[in-house]
Amino acid sequence: MFRRIIRRTGKEEGGQSLVEFAFVLPIFLLVLFAIVDFGMAFNAWLTVTNSAREGARLGTIHAPAVDIEQRVRNTASSLDQADLTVTVTNADGDPGTSVVVDVSYTYSVMTPVAGLVSMVSGGTVSDTFTISSTADMRLE
């Protein structure tokens, strides 16, 4: 008539949660590293785009190409200057023509995501890629 109530403490399932965590942790870390790398690459893209625009803006008032390049490098000071390439075209042109500033940056992936993706893809994915931007503004 009286039933005994057996209380389970959940200790029998302790190993199961550890195994589930071991399966989920690499996926979680991969997503976390991908988010960090995407954010850093997006920041580099914004910096490259803004620095090209700033250089072209300076070029509209007939500034020398050396000054334009220096403005671009100053604007992109948060990036590694050794990986930054600046090309200025038609800085001393006639009014009404365009000055063109082309900026490219070689971005290196910071986290081991590229290594994992490269391992899975058989080496077809590189851990560096080029971010570039071109700004074209009319000379005054």
Image: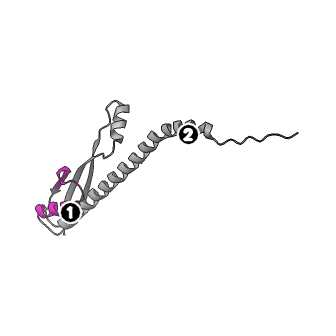
Please provide the residue range marked out in magenta.
64-87
Is disc 2 placed on a helix, strand or loop?
helix
Q: Residues within 10 Å of mark 2 (few under 14, many from 20)?
A: few
Q: Which residue is mark 1?
A: 55
Outermost residue toward the right in this view: 1
Residue 35 is one of the magenta-drawn residues:
no
Name the amino acid, label 2.
Ser
Q: Which numbered mark, 1 or 2, is in the foreground of this view?
A: 2
Cα separation, mark 1 vs mark 2, equals 56 Å
Residue under the point 36% across and 53% down? 39
55 or 83, nearer to the observer: 83
Q: Is residue 74 visible?
A: yes
Residue under the point 26% across and 56% down? 48
Using the rendered view, name the quadrant where residue 103 is placed.
bottom left
Mark 1 or 2, nearer chain start: 2
Q: Position of residue 133 (x, y in %)?
A: 27, 54
Residue 46: image tag = none
Q: Split into 4 quadrants, where in the image is the C terminus?
A: bottom left
75 or 58, nearer to the observer: 75
Count how many numbered circles sit on residues in the image. 2
Q: Which residue is mark 2?
A: 17
Name the amino acid, label 1.
Gly
> 65 above or below 106?
below
Model colouring? one colour
